[in-house]
């Protein structure tokens, strides 16, 4: 794209990049940076048990990454509960349980090391989460050091995010808030959810997927790379500054 400056860390020499020359990085949050997806699963299992139904990973795949109300509609519809539970009542019921669980949130393996590294090298990084601000605050309260390194954070109830993932809205809003012009084809999104990978691709960006191993491999389709953990990510492959301490 015309007028797009070379990244600040670039020394102008050819690197070992084989998958592109990434200039900006956007992180998903739930299930990617933070180990919160299990909380949603647990609470939803409890609610379904009351109706004699079982929560499974094909339902999980359809809900994860979405805005709360959009995921709630999927839950009620897919589980055939419309006669006994509205999406709004479902959200209200799970809220108390979730709020307690969120305060115990842990980082996913490799998240801190990667964020520290990209920040130290001057790579512009941000978070784009379908989670609304109230939940974002609860989930991140013990990890403010990590999230403080983000250039900005876009949450699901941001006015610019009209539609949740797989709409590209949230990633387009996130890219716009970096400084200067951003070539969307050089933005790398990290995601754990099928809807999130689709949103990144709909935004014209690159997508690395770090899925839960229980997610069927058919949902990996569309990702530019699939990793078992953020710890497996090699920045140099994407034209990003390499890790210097390879012992980690
Ligand atoms: O994966 P995130 O960070 O977009 O969050 C989405 C929901 O809050 C949880 O699936
Ligand atoms: Mg996620």
Image (tube, grey):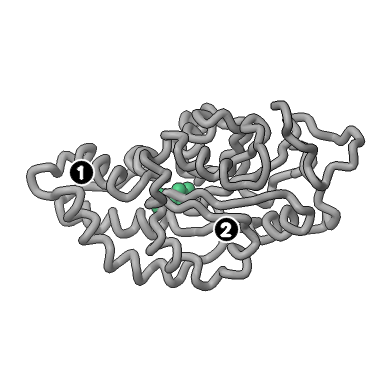
Q: Residue at x 58, y 41 (%)?
A: 175
- Report the disc number at residue 76: 1
For the residue labelled by badge 1, is the local secondary structure a helix, a strand or a loop? Answer: helix
Task: Look at the picture and state if 191 lies above or below 134.
Answer: above
Dot 2 or dot 1, earlier in sequence: 1
Mark 2 sits on what residue? Answer: 108
Q: CA distance from mark 2 to mark 1?
A: 29 Å
**Relative side of 229 to 86, left or right:** right
For the residue labelled by badge 2, is the local secondary structure a helix, a strand or a loop? Answer: loop
- Which corner quadrant holds the C terminus? bottom right
Crowd rating for badge 2 (residues with CA inside 10 Å; few <14, some 14–19, many 20+): some
Crowd rating for badge 1 (residues with CA inside 10 Å; few <14, some 14–19, many 20+): some
Q: Residue at x 41, y 57 (%)?
A: 38
Q: Residue at x 78, y 42 (%)?
A: 7
* Residue 216 visible in the picture: no
Task: Look at the picture and state if 200 lies above or below 25.
Answer: above
- Report the disc number at residue 135: none
**Relative side of 100 to 243, left or right:** left
**Relative side of 245 to 208, left or right:** right
- Give percent across and percent down for residue 50: 16, 56
- Give percent across and percent down for residue 19: 73, 30
- Which corner quadrant holds the N terminus? top right
Task: Give whichever of 86, 176 is nearer the camera.
Answer: 176
Task: Give whichever of 214, 20 is nearer the camera.
Answer: 20
Q: Ligand 2 within 8 A of label 2's CB?
A: no
**Circles 2 and 1: CB distance less than 8 Å?**
no
Task: Look at the picture and state if 190 lies above or below 101.
Answer: above
């Amino acid at each position: 794209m015309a007028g797009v400056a070379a990244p600040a860390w670039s020394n102008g020499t050819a690197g070992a990049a084989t998958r592109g020359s990434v200039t900006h990085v956007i992180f998903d949050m739930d299930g990617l940076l933070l180990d919160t997806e299990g909380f949603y699963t647990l609470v939803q299992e409890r609610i379904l048990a009351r109706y004699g139904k079982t929560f499974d990973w094909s339902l999980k795949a359809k809900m994860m990454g979405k805005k709360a109300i959009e995921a709630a509609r999927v839950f009620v519809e897919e589980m055939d509960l419309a006669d006994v539970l509205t999406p709004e009542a479902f959200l209200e019921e799970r809220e108390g349980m979730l709020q307690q669980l969120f305060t115990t949130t842990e980082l996913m393996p490799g998240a801190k090391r990667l964020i520290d590294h990209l920040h130290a090298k001057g790579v512009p990084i941000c978070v784009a989460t379908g989670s609304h601000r109230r939940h974002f605050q609860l989930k991140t309260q013990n990890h403010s050091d990590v999230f403080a390194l983000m250039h900005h954070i876009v949450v699901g109830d941001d006015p610019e995010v009209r539609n949740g993932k797989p709409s590209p809205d949230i990633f387009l809003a996130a890219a716009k808030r970096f400084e200067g012009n951003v070539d969307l084809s050089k933005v790398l999104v990290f995601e754990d959810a099928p809807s999130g990978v689709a949103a990144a691709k709909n935004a014209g960006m690159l997508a690395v997927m770090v899925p839960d191993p229980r997610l069927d491999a058919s949902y990996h389709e569309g990702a530019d790379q699939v990793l078992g953990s953020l710890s497996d990510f090699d920045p140099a492959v994407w034209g990003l500054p390499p890790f210097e301490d390879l012992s980690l």
